[in-house]
Image (spheres, rainbow, N blue to C red):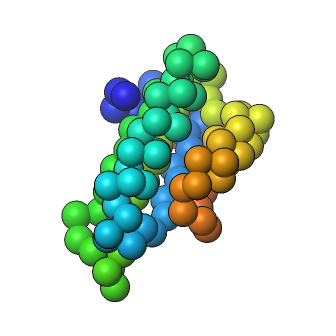
Amino acid sequence: MTAVDPSARGRCLFVYYRVPAPRLEAAAAAARALQADLVARHPGLEAALLRRPELRDGDATLMETYAAPAGVDDALAAEIARLAAAAGLPQPRHVEVFEPLT
């Protein structure tokens, strides 16, 4: 996975969710596998997995980021959500969309 550079891309997707600390390693492995699959199937897609440095109420917060040269469109965002649910990633997933300032 590569770092996402939103300034060089169109619409970017930021997805965050909480994971109980004991499940962090398994959730991170599932998220990395999901992102590797998506990057392999979508040329130019960049993905990264981040975490908050602190726990909150015993939970870690993970954030998946996605960017592509033409931006992340609604179809790709829906595919990410569908595959994340199928992979058993924690729900609910909070999705934020940002785009570069012009």
Q: Do we see residue 84 in this rendering? A: no
Residue at the extreme right of the image, as rendered: 75
Nearer to the camera, 97 or 99: 97
| Number of numbered markers | 0
Image location of residue 79, percent across then percent down: 71, 38
Q: Do we see residue 19 in this rendering? A: yes
User: Is 94 situated above or below 102?
Assistant: below
Q: Residue at x 57, y 28 (%)?
A: 38
Residue 102 appears left or right of 7: right
Residue at the extreme top of the image, as rendered: 43
Residue 59 appears left or right of 95: left
Image location of residue 2, percent across then percent down: 35, 27
Image location of residue 59, percent across then percent down: 36, 75
Q: Residue at x 42, y 39 (%)?
A: 32
User: Is 102 situated above or below 62?
Assistant: above
Q: Quadrant of the N terminus?
A: top left
Residue 95 appears left or right of 23: right
Nearer to the camera, 22 or 76: 22
Nearer to the camera, 41 or 27: 27
Residue at the extreme bottom of the image, as rendered: 57
User: Is 14 situated above or below 77?
Assistant: below
Image location of residue 83, percent across then percent down: 65, 42
Residue 18 appears left or right of 82: left
Q: Quadrant of the C terminus?
A: top right
Q: Residue at x 49, y 64 (%)?
A: 17
Q: Residue at x 60, y 37 (%)?
A: 11
